Structures are given as structure tokens and as C-alpha cells.
Image: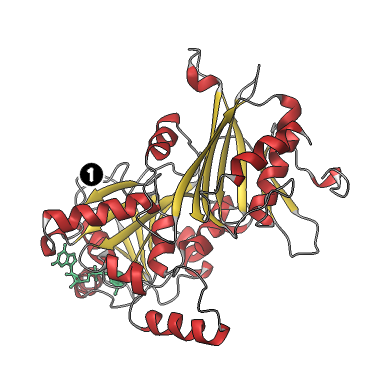
Amino acid sequence: MDGDSSDDDIPSLVPETKPRVVPGDDDEAPELLATSNEAPRGKVPITIVTGYLGAGKTTLLNYILTEQHGKKIAVILNEFGDSIDIEKQLTISDENSTEAKPAPFVPLANGCICCSVKDIGVAAIENLMEHQGNFDYILLETTGLADPGNIAPLFWLDDGLGSSIFLDGIVTLVDAKNVLKSLDEGFGDEAEKLEERKHEDGHSHEGPLLTTAHLQISHADVVLVNKTDLVSEAELQTVVDRIRSINGLAKIKTTTKSQVPQLEGLVLDLHAYDEVTDADLKFASKGHSHLDPTISTSTINFPAITKNQLDKFDEFLRTILWEDELPNSVPHEKFEIHRLKGRVPIVDGEVLLVQGVRNVYDTTEAKRKPSVDEQDTEAKLVLIGKGVDQPGFHKSLIATLAGS
Ligand SMILES: Nc1nc2c(ncn2[C@@H]2O[C@H](COP(=O)(O)OP(=O)(O)OP(=O)(O)O)[C@@H](O)[C@H]2O)c(=O)[nH]1
Ligand SMILES: [Zn+2]
């Protein structure tokens, strides 16, 4: 397959500067955004809080706004008056202030500031950034129907907002009582739309339903299974197992009233888009249940690659992420990748870390740990999505690396 692939387009995988690659429109040459390889110091981290209608997102943010956690957090709620409690806080804060309200940002007693906007648009965040110094963390609640895969690249990419903000991770709230139904049928209007679409297309054999609930779980770095008070132990376990089978990489915690046992690592400072630890990937590779017919997690294990194979490895990533194809014409069923993480040791070199969300991906080199053990010779690529558990992935990767 070397024939028509133009070598000029292959981004360097030996990053003095970190390549961040975005596919252009179909006929455009891909755009390559160079960024510095430094930790995102000086940038404000943002955690996206997503989850289905009524799952407990606002309850979580409310909880954080009133907790004493010693952090200055800016909370952006996507709907004004979304929660009565927040409204109350807004009112109280306004009363305390003598000035005309410089809406929409309201300082709260514990050092947080709160903003309520209809649109989670870029403008709200730019407005917020003018308050820089007043806070050191941003939490953003998306609407219940949001697809986090579309939002994440907004903050992950280095142009525009990404220069002052970095994406720390995605937290998905799940309603323990309703999530299984949402996964099987969609939710309310969505169920009807999905049903309609099926009829319009005339594809009754389209395969299993991909709902918003799937998208929110497959992109999550942390899943909080909330409303545990409404289900039995056994039901809760079923829910957790189903979520685990969809997303083998996410941390899963159960909560009532969105009361997370700790913020650090569960809502804040997730580092989901910069670190790729061996432990994360090992965990993901364990489960092979197929409890969900639509989305699953799959791991490709392969030997460490050589420096000469870096371009080939990148070709593999580009082909699966941008073209939804397996290179080397390996036959396959249709697939769709939502999230990707990998650790790929380079023989006599560093370890390549790979991050992907939908068709955007990023590679960085991490220093090898001094101890030489198994993780230095084994590479792992974890894929979350539709149809990612086909043996063709492994076959195609090995063939591509071999350069045939
Ligand atoms: N029983 C029970 N109710 C809960 C729990 N957590 C939240 N609720 C209630 O569920 C309702 C919805 O919670 P919200 O926090 O507004 O949910 P949301 O995800 O922000 O909802 P939308 O913004 O409408 O998508 C509220 O009435 C909450 O009080 C819980 O653990 N158990
Ligand atoms: Zn809400």
C-alpha cells in the first residue's frame, strides 16, 4: 500500500515538538498543529461534566460549589435556572454585592465563581478567561444531549481556546435507575428520532442502536453512577458491568446525590488527556465481556516498535481514525473509534504515548522508567468504539508495521 500514500503528509512522530493532528476536509491535506512538548503549565484545566438528562450533573456542580475544598473553581452551567439551588446562590451573591452585577460570573463564599449561560459556546469561556487569576479550574456542564466527542477537541486542540485552557478529562454522570433503558432504547424524543431514522434509511438491519448514552459513556474518563438509592445492589452491579463493558478505560464510582468521595482524581486533576499509564491500559485489557451490543473496548497487544516503524505506526493511526479503514486492505466490518489510548515502547528509545478522541489524535514521548521490565517490550493500544473488537485490527497493524 506504499504506492499512493504521499510521504510528505506523514507527520513526524519523533516530537521535539508534539504533533497534534487534525484531519482536514476530505480532499484537503491534513493540518498539522505543532505544540510544545511541555506540561500544560500556566494553562487552566477544564473538566467537562456530561450525562443524560436528569442524571445529576447540576447536583454535582452544586455540591462542589458549596463544599470547602480550597480551590478556586469556575463553574459554567449551560442553562440558566437549571437548578433552584444555584439560582438561590446567584441571588444571595447578588444581594451581597453593591455593584451592578457584572453578569454572568458570580463569586461564591468558598472561592468558586459561578456562571450560568444558555449556550456553552466559546464566547462564555473567553469571557471567563478575562477573569483569569480569580480561579484555577473550570468545570463545564454540558446539556444532557451533548456528544462529548464533539466538545472535547474544542479544548484539546492548541489553536484558539486550547492555548489558555487544557482538557483535563470528561466526567459522565449516569442515572443508575434509567441508564440501561437509555442504552437500549435511547431516551424520550431521542428514542423516537432513532426509530424514525431507521425507517427513513430503510435500513432495518442497521445493527445495534448507538444512543447518546453510549456516546457519553464511551468518551468518559470517569463515570459516576448516580442515584444508587433508587436501585438494588444487584441492579447497580448490572449497571456497572454494562458500563465497564462499554468503556474499559474509565474509572467507575457509584454515588448518591452526586456526592463523590473525593474530587481529586474523580472530578478534578484527571490528567486523562496527557498521561497514559501502563496500569490504565492493563486494566482495560482484562475485560472481554460483550454485555453491550453497540460499543466495546478492545486492546491490541504488539511488540515494541523500532524508530524506523514510527511512520508506519502513524499510517496505521491515520487510516483507522481518518478513513475508518484498516490499512493493508485487511477485510473488516464497519467500525467507529470514539476513544483511543496507547503506550508504545520504542526499541532503544522512549515510550510513545498515544491519545485519540474520534478522528483527532496526539502522540508524545514519555521518558522510559529506569527499571526494565515487561512493560518495556510490550506495546498496547486500547480502542473504544463500535466494531473495535475485530481480529483484523491486530492483523492490519502487524502487517503495516512490517511494511508490506
Ligand atoms: N433519588 C435521587 N435523586 C437524585 C440524586 N441525584 C440527583 N437527584 C435528583 O435528580 C434530579 C435531577 O438532578 P440534576 O442534578 O438537575 O440533573 P442534571 O443532570 O443536571 O439534569 P439536566 O440538566 O436536566 O440534564 C433533581 O431533582 C435531583 O435532586 C440521587 O442520587 N438520588
Ligand atoms: Zn443540569
Query: Which of the 4 quarters of the picture holds residue 192?
Result: bottom left
Decide if residue 150 is on the left or right side of residue 307. left
Q: Is residue 365 visible?
A: yes
Q: In this rendered view, identify the residue nearer to me: 180 or 174.
A: 180
Q: Residue at x 78, y 43 (%)?
A: 10
Residue type indicated by callout 1: Gln
Q: Quadrant of residue 7?
A: top right
For the image, the number of numbered tags is: 1
Camera sees residue 109: no
Q: Nearer the viewer, residue 229 or 91?
A: 229
For image coordinates 41% across by 60% down, the residue present is 293
Q: Quadrant of ligand 1?
A: bottom left
Which of the colour schemes (rainbow, by chain, secondary structure, one colour) is used? Answer: secondary structure
Q: Position of residue 236 (x, y in %)?
A: 18, 56
Q: Is residue 96 left or right of residue 161?
A: left
Q: Residue at x 81, y 47 (%)?
A: 9
The residue nearer to you, when weighing 169 against 78, is 169
Q: According to the image, label 1 marks what residue?
A: 262
Q: Residue pushed farthest top?
A: 371
Q: Quadrant of the N terminus?
A: top right
Disc 1 CB within 8 Å of nearest ligand 1 atom: no
Within 10 Å of disc 1 (Cα), the crowding (few <14, some 14-19, many 20+) is few
Q: Position of residue 314 (x, y in %)?
A: 70, 41
Say which quadrant the C terminus sits in: top right
Q: Residue 138's spot in the image, x, y percent?
A: 40, 55
As drawn, 217 above or below 53: above
Question: Residue 381, image x and y in percent?
Answer: 54, 38
